[in-house]
Image (tube, rainbow, N blue to C red):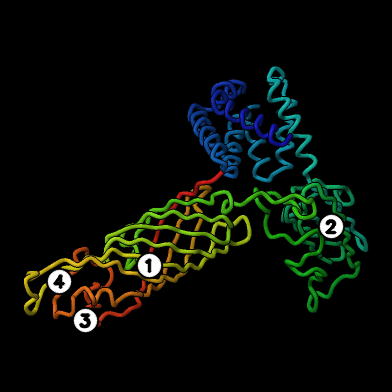
Amino acid sequence: MLRARAIVVAASLQLVGVVGTSRAFGQVQEAPSPEAVELARRLFREGVEAAEAGRWEEARIRFTRVLSIRPAPLVRFNLALACRSDGHLVEAVEHFRQFARDPSVAADRARLAAATDEIAAISQRLARLQIVVSGDDPQGFMLDGHPQSLALLGQEIVVNPGNHVVDIRGRAGDSQRREGAFYEGERIRVDIALTPTTPDPVAAPVRTTAPSRAQSFGHWVARPGPGGRWVDWAAQGIAAPPSVWERRPFTLALGVGGGSPVGILSVSMRYFPQRWFGLELAAGGPSAYGEGFVLHAHARVPLAAPSIYAIGLFVGPGLNLTGLEIGCITDCGPAGETHVAHVTTVSLDVGTSHEWRLGDHFSLRLTAGLRWLVNRSDLRAATGGQAVTCASTTGSIFGDSPCGHLTGDASAIGGFLGLDIGYGIGP
């Protein structure tokens, strides 16, 4: 049912994006200036593009501006969709109702049916707040920093799911605050007892029984869960929608590095069957040790959803195809004055990673670590015991030359840095 409704709404949105700019603007009798009309058309196109890309907050802002210029029904329908998807459920219901009441859309049965379905579905998700005040007559009432009519006290107030702040001021000067969060479809009653005694203006100018930022009703939820929904997933017995870390288990990346086990440029493929564990295979070059390959195992910890950052650790082996041009200091025999030796060097790499999500597919990752060269003796053996000079045939400006290991001057441990941008692939 939910999926079918989402398909109807998405189809409607695409249709509005095609014909809305021509039909909707012609339905307003008082035409604004040509400059304002052109601005509205541009904002409408930008709003449709943002909605199709899932940037609902941006779409909501664009459609709101268009509606202020040309209050057309199809613009209002798009605004209602954007409000629904951005968590502004109260506003979404009101816009859908205004759209359905407009006589000019009577023939648009598809959108009228979609609006009716949306009103019914969203109404079930709205939260309701009832504030009951006792002890003194209230003189001021604010909800989320906005003044409200005192007549609303004692009545159910429809609010969006999420965090809310209630401020009440009594006739005698007592001022109290309550804070908390609503889940979707939740009803909460808040009782506030005002003190009818005038406070001492010096000793206690304001008495606040609930300290700021303290949970005093509902739930203490800092932000919505996956998909922007204020839902208690555990209580509903529903698995939370998978995060982007789980929906994109494969990542193809292109990177650059300094002292990197795989060289200055690299391509890699990461696979995370679990959001916290995965493997990476990378290849690249050039480097001081020649073309490189690594196989790393990663442990990664994304922050609580919806997260865009994860920190991780990795460890694994690396291989480098090292080429050495060796020249003789003394007589090397009939083999000649110089020869090229090829040695596969083996390293053990350990490090940390810092990954940021750039939208639904792209990611940026910074890695830093140490590499330990395991088989330095194989490099020294390439000289055949002769006193030689050496030059790396694949050397670069990054990293120490492997020739230092022929004389034992080079350290077995070196650092590396890498930066890559990846594209996530998944269902």
Q: Secondary structure at mark 2?
A: strand
Residue 407 x, y percent position in the rendering: 21, 81
Question: Which residue is disc 2 drawn over?
Answer: 139
Residue at point 53% right, 56% down? Answer: 272
Circle nearer the N terminus (3, 2): 2
Residue 51 x, y percent position in the rendering: 57, 38
The kind of residue tagged 4 is: Ile
Q: Is residue 319 above or below residue 182?
A: below
Q: Which mark is residue 201?
A: none
416 or 182, which lies in front?
Answer: 416
Q: Which residue is farthest top?
A: 107
Closer to the observer: label 2 or label 1? 1
Residue 322 x, y percent position in the rendering: 26, 66
| Quarter of image, res 288 | bottom left
Q: Secondary structure at mark 3?
A: helix
Question: Which residue is disc 4 drawn over?
Answer: 326
The kind of residue tagged 3 is: Thr
Q: Is residue 28 visible?
A: yes
Question: Which residue is disc 1 drawn over?
Answer: 417
Question: Rounded to the nearest whole Å, what is the CA distance between mark 1 and mark 4?
Answer: 29 Å
Residue contact between numbered discs 1 and 4, judged by CB atoms under 8 Å: no
Residue 98 x, y percent position in the rendering: 73, 30
Q: Quadrant of the N terminus?
A: top right
Closer to the observer: label 1 or label 4? 4
| Quarter of image, res 207 | bottom right
Q: Which mark is residue 407?
A: 3
